[in-house]
């Protein structure tokens, strides 16, 4: 009997949903899972029909982090370094994906699972979701999750979480900016759908330009960021989508790309 795939992708209404499918292990990030995730996210994000990618987990948990059994089976430092480098390439792929990547979080997102959430461009969670960089409770500081977490929330908050390993509930994750929406009851897909629909309604070229521009200016000093952003806006003004959007606004009609 063939083994079930670790990751699947479904595309609907300009949104690709990439789902981790190891529910019995809480979608732990084995080496094979890391490979499959990067392949699926990259392929989905490069599809010209896709305006956003949703990263989801099957079962009770979003992702419990690295596969600890696999890690303990390979105690040599060279293998461990290669694993964390492999995980880093996935995190870079999420950031480099041309369209926005959103985390859909139900249940727990711990250690590298929390890193996934922090590395995505946006995140929506259920009221029951919980987040932690809890490796310190096992004697292992979450150094790699701290990279994404310290860029998604304040550095001091990230340091406190990585040093204590305590869990964030949904409301605190929202207040810190780790997630952008909290869904009540069984409304996670409805709340997520409202956000993805807003993205799907925009021109793909502008989403691609906007994501790349935002993260690039974020890494620059103020003066360089302003100069870079000015150049990006001037270039964006030459997009046919901008010409049509502005003309439609001035003529009090819907832009043609919104009706496609």
Image (spheres, rainbow, N blue to C red):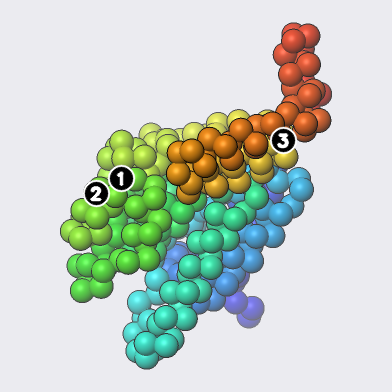
Residue 250 coordinates in the image, percent (x, y): 74, 10
Q: Residue furthest bottom?
A: 76
Residue under the point 40% across and 41% down = 179
Lateral position of residue 124 relative to residue 227, left or right: left
Relative height, residue 259 to residue 248 (above, below): below
- Evaluate if marks 1 and 2 touch, with contact meaning CB atoms under 8 Å apart: yes
Dot 3: few (<14), some (14–19), or many (≥20) neighbours within 10 Å? few
Residue tagged 3? 235
Q: Secondary structure at mark 1?
A: loop
Q: Quadrant of the C terminus?
A: top right
Q: Secondary structure at mark 2?
A: helix
- Viewer-side label of 2, 3: 3
Q: CA distance from mark 2 to mark 3?
A: 37 Å
Asked whether residue 104 appears in the rendered view, the answer is no
Q: Quadrant of residue 134?
A: bottom left
Q: Residue furthest front?
A: 223
Lateral position of residue 210 relative to residue 190, left or right: right
Q: Which mark is residue 154?
A: 1
Lateral position of residue 39 relative to residue 148, left or right: right
Residue 111 coordinates in the image, percent (x, y): 34, 63
């Amino acid at each position: 009997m063939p083994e079930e795939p670790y990751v699947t992708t479904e595309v609907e209404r300009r949104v690709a949903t990439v789902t981790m499918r190891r529910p019995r292990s809480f979608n732990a990030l084995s080496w094979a899972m890391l490979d499959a995730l990067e392949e699926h996210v990259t392929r989905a994000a490069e599809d010209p029909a896709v305006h956003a990618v949703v990263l989801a987990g099957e079962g009770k948990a979003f992702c419990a982090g690295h596969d600890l059994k696999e890690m303990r089976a390979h105690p040599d430092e060279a293998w461990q370094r290669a694993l964390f480098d492999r995980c880093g390439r996935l995190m870079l792929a999420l950031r480099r994906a041309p369209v926005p990547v959103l985390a859909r979080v139900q249940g727990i997102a711990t250690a590298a699972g929390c890193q996934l959430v922090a590395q995505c461009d946006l995140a929506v969670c259920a009221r029951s979701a919980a987040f932690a960089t809890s490796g310190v409770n096992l004697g292992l500081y979450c150094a790699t999750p701290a990279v994404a977490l310290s860029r998604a929330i304040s550095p001091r908050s990230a340091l406190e979480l990585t040093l204590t390993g305590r869990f964030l509930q949904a409301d605190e994750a929202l207040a810190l900016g780790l997630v952008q929406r909290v869904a009540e009851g069984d409304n996670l897909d409805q709340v997520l759908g409202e956000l993805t629909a807003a993205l799907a309604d925009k021109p793909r070229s502008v989403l691609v330009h906007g994501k790349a521009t935002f993260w690039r200016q974020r890494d620059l000093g103020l003066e360089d960021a302003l100069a870079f952003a000015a150049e990006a806006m001037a270039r964006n003004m030459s997009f046919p989508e901008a010409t049509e959007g502005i003309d439609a606004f001035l003529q009090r009609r819907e832009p043609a790309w919104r009706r496609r």
